[in-house]
Image (cartoon, helix red, strand yellow):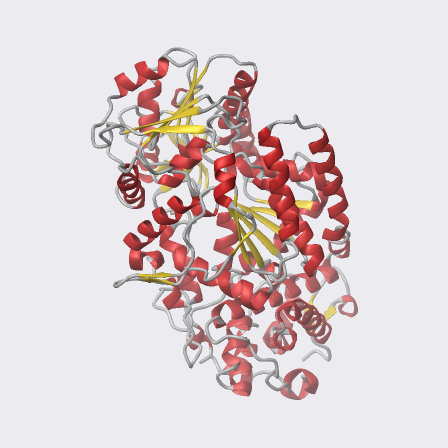
Amino acid sequence: MTEKFYSHSVEGKPTREWQGLEEHLKGTAELAAEFASEFGSGEWGCLAGLWHDMGKYSEDFQKMLLASADAHIETKPGRVDHSTAGAIHSVEKLNIPGRIFSYIIAGHHAGLPDWQTDTAGRKSLIQRLQNIELLRNLPFSDIPHHIIEQALPKQKFRTSEGHALWIRMLYSCLVDADFLDTEAFLDLDKSKTRKGYPSLNELQPLFNTYMEMKQAGADNTDVNKQRADILRQCIAKSLHEPAIFTLTVPTGGGKTLSSMAFALHHAAEHGKRRIIYVIPYTSIIEQTADQFRELFKDAIVEHHSNVDVSDEGHETTKSRLACENWDAPVIVTTSVQFFESLFANRSSRCRKLHNIANSIVVLDEVQLLPPEYLNPILHTMKELHKNYGVTFVLSTATQPAFGEHKSFDFNFEGLGSTVEIMENPVALHKAFKRVEIHVPDNLMTARTWEDLAKELAQHMSVLCIVNRRDDCRMLYELMPEGTFHLSALMCGAHRSKVIAQIKQRLKDKLPTRVISTQLVEAGVDLDFPVVYRAIAGLDSIAQAAGRCNREGLLNKGSVVLFAPPSKIPVGYLRQAANTSMMMLSDKTNDLLLPAMFEKFFKSLYWLQGENLDKHGILKDLATDGELRFSFYTAAQKFKLIDDSRYAPVIVSYEEGERLIGMLKKLGPERWLMRKLQRYVVNLPRYVHTKLRNEDAIMEVHPGIFVQEYGAMYHNDLGFCADKSMIYEPDDLMC
């Protein structure tokens, strides 16, 4: 046996230059304690760090380390299990509370496990705890007493309902600390690169200067006066004690910058560490990030799939590292990345979670949270606010009914009490009212696409929004030449180009007719005099109205509702449309009043009932006396995008063709895959399978498919494999 125990080796270097095991355990413990102290659990983080690699004291591990420089990477085939010993020791030493550490330690490489699982090929925690020989074979006489002999931390967790989240947060502290301590030893230059971000207090003057210049250059219109007042109210409300806030501002009211103003001032007042801006669509995240980057330069980090590594303004080595653990003052990310991470079990997804503590999280277009996951999401948000110092801002023009409400057969806990930032949302709505909504006399009578196309063609500039991609194509093909088409059958690069063309034509006051799916309804700053909208949920109708007379240049814009000839897809979309139709039948109501959205969402959530936790995730993570959780199972269930329904293909649109050639030659290098994200279209699985069988798309690397036939991608319509195919509605949570 070696006289000294090591944690990490350096290839080609003598053992005296390797990292000692005790050194690594202490370093990890110190960092984990620092991270966990943000939520009053520093002692727990410290102990997790001291015990996480206890298994590396084994003779088998030390021998493997001498033979292989990457022996510490436990998940590689043939590697020594060095995680289970510490997990077993935790339970033996601390009994039931020790299970908290056992989840964290056992999973710090392989991911948080289930206590007991039926999943084939995956060991449950209880199974791993039975490998008692992994602990018994350790040389206890050689392990420092101050490491092995530790008592249960005196710090108590503050609630009996959120142990699963607490374990995941402690897990995040350990995983990040382990990574960072290892990195500081193996790659000091990389470690140093992480440093040097400015604080939020340093960013605030930059923001204030920017807004002063912006307001000084703005026209003295009623809309701009209202936007200035919204900004004022946000700054004033920032002094309020931390809470879960709602920001109810009509479309076009400047929510993005005003919510950032609130966040910066609130952070200064209450000592918050970072701002996390969460956006539901990848299609608009880039424009939001660009807006913030104009203010904050490289202090902002984008964490999503469409960042172009070739653009140094978007991603640098430093920002790429910050994506790993969100150690930056301003993070712009997607709903998928944020919420799936909160329910994840993998170390790479959970690593950043501890940096959410003591932050401000702005949820943009919060009404788009998927109902089938609503209860677990809201439960977690309440826990983050109550026990981790997170201030939430729920920003939207169509505020959902997240307050508690009960009926004879259904109780909705929601978020409990919230604080509205705007002084008078009703008055604000009336001030921003720029459209008249025209409801047909009979909502049950469907229009034909032919009649609708003739009516649309009479308008010089008009936007028509439909519910399905196939509807979009059908109507587009009946329209006059020069009409624009927008749908998710077009790749991101294609959509961005077309949207830019549309904006320029509207600016130049040229005739502009657009047929689109609902992808234009949020975050896309288009301004049409007339908008047509197929019957949908009231929130979608309101978002469509936000694309009409946006700048208030007309006395009133026109929003025309119509019943399409195609059926609204079953499930939530149809329920939302039916709920809207009941409300639309009373033509005396102002449909866009905040009270109408509360009524709409209450009705909709009542219809969902138990389906607000459709997959039973809260049950998987519920606290019991023996701390039996199903972390792996919950992570598998919590998927905001259903991968089983769609599959991606890289298309040959413009630069996409050249990039596909590079992919075939170079393989899936990281920088190249980032660039290719702009050229991806998600197809229904059955379409994807059919095209694979016909060799119309090719698997160039495992799981990576590319378009083979150039004719399948149309310069106007996007991916057109078969005009007879009926496509599912766009999935906007991406």
* Residue at (50% x, 48% y) in the render: 335
Quarter where residue 531 is shown: top left
Picture layout, residue 577 above or below residue 241: above
Going by the image, does 1 lie left or right of 603?
A: right
Q: Is residue 294 left or right of residue 175?
A: right
- State the residue at coordinates (72%, 52%): 200
Could you say which is closer to the camera, residue 200 or residue 151?
200
- Residue 564 or residue 499, whichever sits in front: 564
Badge count: 0
Q: Is residue 113 left or right of residue 615?
A: right
Does residue 328 appear in this view? no
Q: Which quarter of the figure is the N terminus placed in?
A: bottom right
Q: Residue at x 56, y 36 (%)?
A: 253
Q: Position of residue 389 (x, y in %)?
A: 60, 64
Q: Position of residue 380 (x, y in %)?
A: 48, 62
579 w.r.t. 409: above or below:
above
Observer able to see residue 161? yes
